[in-house]
Image (cartoon, rainbow, N blue to C red):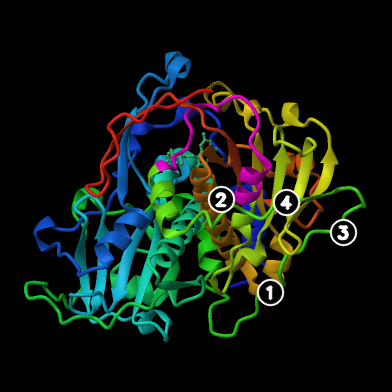
Amino acid sequence: MTHAREAAAARRYLSEGERLQPGNLARVDWGRKLPAVKRYPPRAAVRPADPLPALLRDAYGWTRYQWDDWGQATSLPGMANLALGRPLRAVPSGGGLSSSELYPVGEVPGLPSGAYHYDGAAEALDPVRANVTPADLGLDDTPLALLITSVFGRVSFKYGEFGYRLQCLDAGLLAGQILAVLDAAGLGGRLHTRFHDEAAEERLGLTPTAERPLVAVAVRGLPPAAPAAPGAVPLAAPALPTEHTRPPQVLDTMPHTRTLCAASRDGTGPGAPLPPPLVPGPAWPGDAVALPPPDADPLRPDALAVARRERRSLDGRFGVGPITLAQAATVIAAARHTWEGDVGSRHVLLYCLVNDVTGVPRGAYVYDPAGHRLLRTREGDLREEMWLPPPQRWLLGDQRCAMAVYPAGDYAAGFAACGDRWYQMQNIAAGAVAQRVLLAAAGAGLSSRIMCAAAPADVAKLLALPPAHRPLCEILIGPRGHNVAYAQPLSAGDTWPARTPEVTP
Ligand SMILES: Cc1cc2nc3c(=O)[nH]c(=O)nc-3n(C[C@H](O)[C@H](O)[C@H](O)COP(=O)(O)O)c2cc1C
């Protein structure tokens, strides 16, 4: 265990582990790809009472089966066997590998109190263990919590140590989606990145070297639980997933991630300190761009339903031309939204690169949420500097994105307050902000793609970040583009036409 101020394991992971990106997709052994689901013996699955089925489906249900088209990339040596068809969810995930699993814990409407696993394919819950409560996890003031875990092996075969960064962001994206879905349903949620990890592992029968609990959302405002339906089987011992879908124990093959995860158990406990909110530096006169008020809340219930359906990572080229200042303001203001919880959007600053936004000079900016304005950090046309290496270059035409936004954090301040655990806390907060940005972009009729391909040091230079700020991911945004992948709807609740016409202006 390291002293909070040292955070030696997290610093080592940042300098050694995060750097170990595979780089070459042709070297990935796709035969080691795991199922993107965890399934329990199917006959035991149960259905909770309303409103849980719709909430879970909207948060983490499967939305479509996508047939990718990698075009010229598949003609390269070693690339011919890429899996080109895959199911995708309401939230994005690194590599589309669905690293997260979701467990309702506590008073689940219509079922005996306990821990359950969400099976999105069956739109049902697998009973995992009876009589587990949020209080067992250290969450005292809620009857129901949604626990998000992450499966190392789903990403490690492709990304190695770098995968843990994606896992933390994936968990944050899902937490952000859950908070948005709860808001839209007139309920509420509280984000907890500090809870008793070991108790969660023990109560749910998770293997720490295979699957790690990362974040929980306490659900607020549910009507009192209805009596349990007959037929749900309370289990005294944790149920085990099927052998084929049981997460493999791979953590020992990744020393930096293993050390970071072990050290991150430090820093739990009620009342533990948090770093101060992040604020943008002072702006020079004339370098501030006032933003118009955002369009009506882009995540109000009807808009969220559209955004959930329309959000997808653009596989192809963005549409040509600028986006409007109102669209840009709506997307950027998504970072202004706050939620209840230990870490929040106040721990994330949004930087952005403006390439083609009506009325805004090209350059790099930081968003000042208090003044709802952009403060310029660099002037000029920076598109050439954000040009990515292949294969993204061929796939995305990223130079043509009208705007790119970069959630950024401050590791040093967080390590000083929270120690190693800040690594996951910071990335979870960034993921939650990123998901709001993606939903707002979809709601504003724009295409987007979240990415982690660029080296943080290069992005920091591109945006002229102060030394303390580190970019955590990148979101390309532009006019609706032409999607080369073909997506078939999957979720029973969705009725959009089988082939949505994509327009290229
Ligand atoms: C944390 C994270 C990092 C990602 N990094 C990249 C990337 O570097 N390059 C890329 O092309 N796509 C990247 N993606 C996009 C995923 O490939 C995409 O979300 C996934 O295939 C699922 O598709 P969907 O977003 O359309 O649901 C990333 C997604 C996430 C969540």
Q: Which residue is mark 4?
A: 291
Q: Is mark 1 within 8 Å of ligand 1?
A: no
Q: CA distance from mark 2 to mark 4?
A: 16 Å
State the residue position of label 1. Answer: 417
Tell me the crowding category of disc 2: few under 14, some 14 to 19, or many 20 or more residues within 10 angstroms, Cα based: many
> Which range of residues does the magenta coloring cover?
310-331
Which of disc 1 and disc 2 is earlier in sequence? Answer: 1
The answer to whether one can see residue 267 in this image is yes
Which quarter shows the N terminus?
Answer: bottom right
Closer to us: 251 or 357: 357
Q: Position of residue 199 (x, y in %)?
A: 38, 77
Q: Is residue 334 above or below residue 478?
A: below
Which type of secondary structure does the marked residue at label 2 adopt? Answer: helix
Can you identify the residue that label 2 sits on? 437
Q: Is residue 92 left or right of residue 1?
A: left
In the image, residue 234 sits, relative to residue 47, either above or below, namely below
Q: Looking at the image, which residue is at 46% across and 59% down?
A: 300
Give the residue at the far right of this rendering.
285
- The numbered disc on residue 282 is 3
Expressed as whole percent of the image width and height from the top left, the position of residue 40 reads 18, 58
Lower sequence index among marks 4 and 1: 4
Spatial CA distance of label 4 from label 1 is 33 Å
